[in-house]
Amino acid sequence: MRHAIRLDGFALALRPVERADAAFIVQLRTDPHLCYYIHPTSPDVADQEAWLDRYFVREGDYYFVVEQKASGEREGLAGIYNVNAEGTCAEWGRWILRPGSMGAIESALLVYTVAFEQLGLEEVYCRTMIENKQAVSFHRSCGLEERTILPKYLRVGMNEYDAIEQYLTRARWQFCRHKLSRHAERIARRAFTARGAQG
Amino acid sequence: MFPSRLFWRPGLDHREIEQGVCEVFSTVLERKIPTGEPVERSSEPRWDSLKHIELVFSVEEKFDVQFSEQEMATLDALSKMVDAVRVHLETRDSA
């Protein structure tokens, strides 16, 4: 849905996705180094624009660009969606960052901050292909707990893959945020110092 | 939280650097990693983005070095981290 949620972090920020981001979305989601574990995406920018047009009128769906605060350069994407009728629970995903990005921790931190502190959710969950062990491990390291396995959740071509659902409650988030925040700040300080020195 | 006491002293050799880095990896990845075992991010399930930062910061603190943002993104193997530490220490020791 069209929304106006923006959130600044240390070096990164979340801003609403715009129709003009369609080519960037396609670029990332069809990158062979990045797309193995996600739902297939059409390489046609017009198809992505049509998807965005439908997204803009879909309630309970918040799609973000992750961008660098200093330059506005796009770093990646993330979304909070499938908000339940009570407005207490949602899924997050569509999370993808440009190759080589150091923004995983801060982008996750920003998503959780939006979810719990701006949208007022009580719980967020994510569904990750089990084979994507590092993503599953990352979520676990961030404090998410595992709830269930979703058999044949993701279809890629002729193959079907199981997914794992991991979730984070607002209460648990209060314990987890400090670690993510500390790391994100330290990374940002390093990156900001480096870019500042470059002039 | 980080498994580091300052490990650095002038003249550390490659074996000692590797031993120190292995200690960090063993703690952060929560499994015993013997010296000489090849460990790469692409094939290590627990080496996620968060663990990567913890590895980098812990190695920095242990050896009193600081990697650049560009270096951080390239240190995707234990051996590369050992080599990067060695280069930083050699540069400092020769200064």
Image (cartoon, coloured by chain):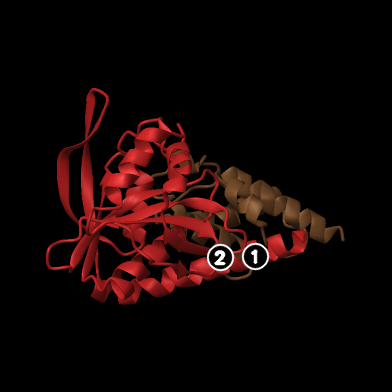
Q: Residue at x 45, y 31 (%)?
A: A32
Give the mark nearest the N terminus, 2 or 1: 2
Tell me the element at label 2: loop
Chain identity for the colour red used in the image: A
Q: Amino acid at mark 1?
A: Phe
Q: Are marks 2 and 1 on the same chain?
A: yes
- Residue pushed farthest left? A85
How many numbered dots are placed on residues in this image? 2
Q: Quadrant of residue A92?
A: bottom left
- Residue A29 in the image: state x and y as whole percent: 41, 38
Question: Crowding near pointer 1: few (<14 within 10 Å), some, many (20+)?
Answer: some
Q: Nearer the viewer, residue B2 or A92?
A: A92
Tell me the element at label 1: helix
Q: Nearer the viewer, residue B61 or A164?
A: A164
Q: Which residue is mark 2?
A: A11
Image: A128 above or below A87: above
Q: Is residue B2 visible?
A: no
Q: Of the numbered discs in the image, which one, if any, rests on residue A192?
A: 1
Label 2 marks which chain's residue?
A: A
Q: Are marks 2 and 1 in contact (CB under 8 Å)?
A: yes
